[in-house]
Image (cartoon, coloured by chain):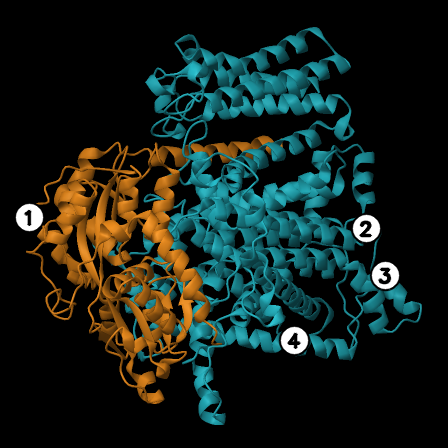
């Protein structure tokens, strides 16, 4: 009987696989860079003796998965990635307060915990900025951009790449930043002008920076810690902090509601906000700003004191209603302007 | 009939009484459950007597069958078996769906819970299913063949549980009303027919096309291109005396064994605005550097590279199989080579052409990696669906509606293919000795094939040379200092107190290979068995059955991934976080290639072969094993190769299913690409390519060529 042998094989693999998955340990899903994820897991295992299984996924993917698994989660902790999806998860009751003491952290990290009633705690901050390819800029004989308004100059027609806020959290941060800097109507007028220079609205938030690094486009908007990384890799790029001021994202850590490993999860949260653990990021090229004041930072990394920052209103701009309204407006007023350059 | 039914009845009763009914912590093979049937590992019988009374339900079917076997014979017995099997299955599914892991579905059963089903449940379900199918064969269906009805039943059950059940979770959301107001069609139709899906503005030159139109145009272009290119390669292999065939063969399979994103990345480095070739033309001829690659043509080019091998794999078996005596007869009747090819050989290749086209079309629709990297502002359904699920505003209803759009296109392509093939007979491999020689191609056609295929092969070669190069330099495109750093970081080994795999890629690499190696033979087996049923057997609902086997392939991986999480995260079937869910998703996603390739190859085998075997007293199982399978070498090879490789290279379906314990190579690579660490991503890709290439060559040696008792001579040219 061929069928019985097939089903026997399937059955045996089923049971083997099911068995291996039952081993007890902490399951962490990580939305940071792979090497940072690996290093943190490794250090945690050494320092606490708790076994960690780690997988890296982007924030949107994690949110979709945590939603689908609600009620019987297979993930214990979600570490890293922009704060907005963490806040959404907190609002939907997908995460649970860990009760970890956050009093030693920087203000913005505590602020995050207050907003989410302790469900999401800030672990790092990333500043929004611009990047241009020095070689391409020189070749085209264009001036270097310094401000958000510069991006709207007709000189840059077809030279600017930004991501699409409908798919990327980076682009939404940019949209919300401009709205907070200039007021909604003026911001959309500016976005529409910038939009007519845009050659492509990428799906992913980190794509424009990488395209500029490789000379596929000239100017890109994104997070500065990614840009520092590109520059350190050797690409001919310069990073610009916009003269009008800029916004930022707060990366967070959340414990998933219903986790069977609450103690280990709490240990993880305490660990990733400790200065020792955060300082190690420099070993693998993490250039965002850690949430503990005692953590070490790289001299080349963007520094919150030297950059003009806006007072980013996460409560308003993270709310679903604001988000949907702004995105609908963006679709109507900005999207149709750009992307017509082939 | 009686013997089979009794056998399955015994298996079912034994499983019910002895094996652990629920999933066992530590796994079945740890045999921890043998120790006095510890708390969770009790068999259903013990559970049923000790509080889980609903577990008495499934045994009703088994007892019914036992009663029937003891008291009746003939048609009455068959009917009783059908009824008791079906009843048992229904009751079993009913109790599973009514009482979940954390709650009961109905208020009357409040407070009852149970874990996910395990080994005992699986065997009882199998026993009930085969009692049912044995009964059906006793009624005279499927020519009264127990084996055939059992196989149909098993495949229908598998497709039902692993395709329809999860898909129902996501498709129902297409009818969800905004603001959680329940279900209805009032919002579905306007959203389904919205212009941002169907607009044809780009054809009229007035703006953007809808995502569905983009997908459709791209799918048609890719399918046409890959079929023509695949045919050109297949003809060179079988009908010309081209000297370097072996080398060419390796080149033709390279692209399918390439992890996603890599081809897109190489194309950008060559043809992007700052690409090598773009720079060259700009310097030499003063052409303006443009971004033409980001859009329709770039995606098309990448898809042509990725999917031509699939068309080739389907076509090579078919082109080879065309009976040389027919071609000889044609020439004896004074047809020239062109006429022979055009009016004899080509029409006989129709099943291959149609299946290659259908696969190319569906692959193109479901492709996710290439449009993501090269799409620019060219939106297709697969990427739109992905971002409807993971975007800044998650909209599962939109994802479900777009998935339905995609499914309707696949259905359209499937029906068109059926119409084109018609009811003709394409059998060319018969039991009769056919010692003729294949007609060579006429010079014009031969040169046309060369002109198409050889530059393409050269192009592929350049791309792969570049990939290898890219993995050995510091920063591809900027700093070409040679280095082994990327390999050391990914695949470092420390030999000190034994061998330690310290590289960061080892973990996902070994998991990926294991899972692919388990999934591939199962995929091929299920796919070819399905093909056998579709080509050789007649049963009610065959067309619907055929289409249902294509479904999981046509749905984009992202949707499948989310649907699997929604369906298999809770009892009755709890699989998330295991390696098994990855194996299952690969089997049911890649099975259609086995089915298509199997159908194409099997429609060439003359029925008289089976009939002769059956007349000589062989059962249909023996006929399948001794007659059909040996003639299916190329199709088996294609199915095995393809499913092995796809298990390694697919991305979108596994993103939601990989877990910390079971991570896959592609999700590792995507993570690195996202972080801009191209070096390590490409080094990993290069190692995967070499591994898969070796595996494929080993498979080819193992399976060998089928013996058609033909000399495989080719007319001297």
Mark 2 vs 4: CB contact within 8 A = no
In this view, A64 is above or below B98: below
Q: Nearer the viewer, residue B693 or B340?
A: B340
**Disc 3 packing (10 Å; few <14; some 14–19; many ≥20):** many
Q: Callout 2: residue from which chain?
A: B
| 3D distance between C-alphas at marks 2 and 1 | 82 Å
Q: Nearer the viewer, residue A157 or B382?
A: A157
**Disc 2 packing (10 Å; few <14; some 14–19; many ≥20):** some
Mark 3 vs 1: CB contact within 8 A = no
Instruction: Please name which of the two marks, 2 or 1, marks the residue nearer to the observer.
Output: 1
**Hue of chain B?**
cyan
Are labels 4 and 3 assigned to the same chain?
A: yes
How far across and how far down the image is residue B443, in percent? 77, 79
Name the residue beneath numbered marker 3.
B326
How far across and how far down the image is residue B556, in percent? 52, 51
Are labels 2 and 4 assigned to the same chain?
A: yes
Direction from residue A244 to residue B553 in the image, left or right: right
Residue B555 appears anywhere in the view: no
Residue B514 appears anywhere in the view: yes
Name the residue beneath numbered marker 4.
B452
Name the residue beneath numbered marker 2.
B430
Q: Quadrant of residue B40?
A: top left
Q: Callout 3: residue from which chain?
A: B
Q: Which mark is residue B561?
A: none
In this view, A269 is above or below A206: above
Q: Nearer the viewer, residue B712 or A157?
A: A157
Name the residue beneath numbered marker 1.
A104
N-term-proximal mark, 2 vs 3: 3
């Amino acid at each position: 009987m061929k069928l019985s042998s097939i089903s026997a094989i399937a059955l045996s693999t089923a049971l083997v696989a099911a068995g291996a998955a039952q081993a007890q340990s902490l399951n962490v899903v990580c939305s940071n860079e792979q090497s940072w994820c690996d290093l943190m897991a490794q250090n945690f295992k050494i320092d606490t003796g708790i076994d960690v299984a780690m997988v890296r996924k982007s924030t949107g993917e994690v949110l979709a998965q945590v939603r689908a698994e609600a009620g019987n989660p297979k993930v214990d902790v979600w570490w890293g990635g922009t704060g907005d999806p963490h806040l959404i998860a907190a609002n939907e009751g997908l995460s649970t307060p860990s009760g970890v003491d956050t009093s030693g952290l920087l203000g913005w990290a505590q602020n995050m915990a207050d907003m989410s009633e302790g469900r999401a705690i800030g672990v790092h901050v990333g500043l929004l900025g611009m990047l241009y390819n020095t070689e391409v800029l020189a070749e085209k004989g264009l001036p270097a951009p310094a401000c958000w308004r510069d991006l709207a100059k007709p000189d840059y027609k077809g030279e600017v790449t930004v991501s699409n806020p409908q798919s990327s959290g980076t682009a939404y941060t940019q949209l919300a930043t401009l709205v907070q800097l200039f007021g909604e109507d003026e911001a959309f007028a500016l976005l529409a002008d910038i939009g007519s220079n845009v050659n492509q609205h990428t799906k992913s938030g980190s794509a424009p920076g990488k395209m500029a690094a490789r000379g596929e486009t000239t100017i890109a908007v994104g997070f500065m810690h990614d840009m520092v990384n590109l520059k350190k890799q050797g690409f001919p790029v310069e990073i610009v902090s916009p003269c009008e001021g800029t916004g930022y994202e707060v990366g967070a850590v959340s414990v998933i509601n219903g986790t069977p490993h609450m103690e280990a999860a709490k240990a993880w949260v305490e660990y990733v906000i400790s200065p020792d653990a955060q300082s190690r990021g420099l070993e693998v090229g993490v250039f965002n700003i850690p949430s503990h004041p005692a953590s070490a930072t790289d001299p080349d990394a963007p520094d919150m004191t030297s950059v003009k920052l806006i007072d980013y209103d996460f409560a308003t701009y993270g709310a679903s209603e604001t988000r949907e309204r702004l995105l609908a407006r963006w679709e109507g007023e900005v999207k149709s302007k750009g992307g017509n350059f082939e | 009939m009686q013997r089979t039914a009794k056998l399955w009845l015994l298996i079912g009763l034994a499983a019910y009484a002895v094996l652990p009914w629920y999933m066992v912590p530590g796994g079945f093979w740890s045999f921890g459950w043998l120790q006095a049937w510890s708390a969770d590992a009790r068999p259903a019988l013990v559970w049923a007597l000790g509080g889980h009374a609903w577990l008495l339900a499934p045994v009703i079917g088994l007892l019914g069958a036992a009663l029937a076997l003891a008291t009746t014979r003939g048609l009455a017995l068959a009917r009783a078996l059908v009824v008791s099997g079906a009843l048992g299955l229904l009751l079993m599914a009913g109790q599973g769906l009514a009482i979940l892991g954390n709650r009961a579905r109905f208020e009357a059963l409040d407070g009852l819970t149970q874990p996910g089903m395990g080994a005992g449940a699986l065997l009882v379900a199998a026993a009930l299913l085969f009692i049912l199918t044995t009964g059906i064969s006793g009624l005279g269906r499927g020519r009264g063949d127990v084996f055939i009805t059992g196989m149909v039943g098993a495949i229908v059950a598998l497709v039902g549980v692993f395709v329809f059940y999860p898909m129902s979770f996501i498709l129902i959301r297409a009818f969800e009303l905004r603001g959680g107001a329940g279900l209805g069609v009032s919002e579905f139709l306007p959203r389904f027919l919205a212009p941002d899906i169907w607009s044809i503005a780009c054809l009229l030159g007035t703006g953007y096309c809808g995502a569905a139109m983009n997908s459709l145009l791209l799918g048609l272009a890719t399918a046409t291109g890959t079929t023509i290119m695949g045919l050109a390669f297949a003809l060179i292999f079988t009908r010309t005396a081209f000297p370097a065939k072996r080398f060419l063969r390796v080149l033709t399979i390279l692209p399918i064994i390439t992890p996603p994103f890599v081809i897109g990345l190489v194309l950008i480095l060559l043809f992007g605005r700052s690409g090598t070739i773009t720079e060259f033309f700009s310097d030499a001829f003063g052409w303006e550097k443009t971004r033409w690659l980001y859009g329709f043509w770039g995606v098309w080019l990448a898809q042509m590279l990725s999917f031509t091998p699939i068309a080739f794999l389907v076509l090579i078996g078919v082109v080879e199989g065309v009976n040389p005596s027919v071609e000889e007869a044609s020439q004896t009747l004074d047809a020239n080579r062109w006429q022979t090819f055009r009016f004899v050989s080509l029409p006989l290749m129709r099943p291959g052409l149609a299946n290659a086209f259908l696969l190319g079309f569906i692959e193109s629709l479901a492709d996710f990696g290439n449009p993501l990297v090269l799409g620019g502002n060219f939106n297709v359904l697969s990427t739109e669906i992905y971002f409807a699920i993971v975007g800044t505003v998650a909209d599962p209803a939109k994802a479900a509606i777009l998935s339905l759009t995609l499914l309707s296109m696949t259905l359209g392509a499937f029906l068109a293919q059926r119409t084109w093939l018609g009811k003709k007979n394409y059998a060319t491999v018969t039991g009769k000795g056919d010692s003729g020689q294949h007609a060579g191609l006429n010079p014009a056609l031969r040169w046309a094939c060369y002109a198409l295929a050889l530059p393409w092969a050269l192009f592929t070669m350049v791309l792969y040379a570049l990939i290898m190069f890219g993995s050995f330099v510091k920063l591809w495109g900027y700093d070409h200092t040679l280095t082994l750093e990327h390999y050391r970081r990914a695949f470092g080994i420390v030999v000190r107190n034994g061998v330690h795999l310290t590289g960061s890629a080892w973990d996902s690499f070994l998991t990926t290979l294991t899972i692919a190696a388990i999934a591939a033979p199962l995929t091929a087996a299920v796919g070819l068995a399905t093909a056998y049923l579709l080509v050789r057997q007649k049963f009610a609902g065959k067309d619907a059955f055929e289409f249902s086997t294509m479904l999981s392939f046509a749905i984009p991986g992202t949707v499948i991934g989310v649907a699997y999480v929604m369906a298999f995260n809770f009892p009755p079937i709890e699989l998330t976080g295991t390696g098994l869910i990855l194996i299952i998703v690969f089997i049911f996603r890649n099975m259609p290639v086995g089915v298509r390739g199997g159908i194409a190859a099997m429609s060439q085998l003359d029925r008289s072969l089976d009939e002769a075997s059956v007349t000589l007293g062989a059962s249909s199982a023996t006929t399948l094993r001794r007659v059909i399978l040996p003639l299916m070498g190329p199709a088996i090879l294609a199915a095995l190769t393809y499913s092995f490789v796809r298990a390694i290279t697919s991305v979108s379906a596994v993103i939601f299913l990989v877990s910390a314990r079971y991570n896959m190579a592609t999700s590792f690579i995507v993570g690195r690409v996202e972080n801009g660490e191209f070096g390590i991503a490409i080094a990993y890709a290069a190692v995967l390519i070499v591994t898969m290439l070796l595996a494929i060559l080993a498979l080819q040696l193992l399976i060998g060529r089928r013996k058609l008792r033909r000399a495989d001579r080719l007319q001297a040219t």
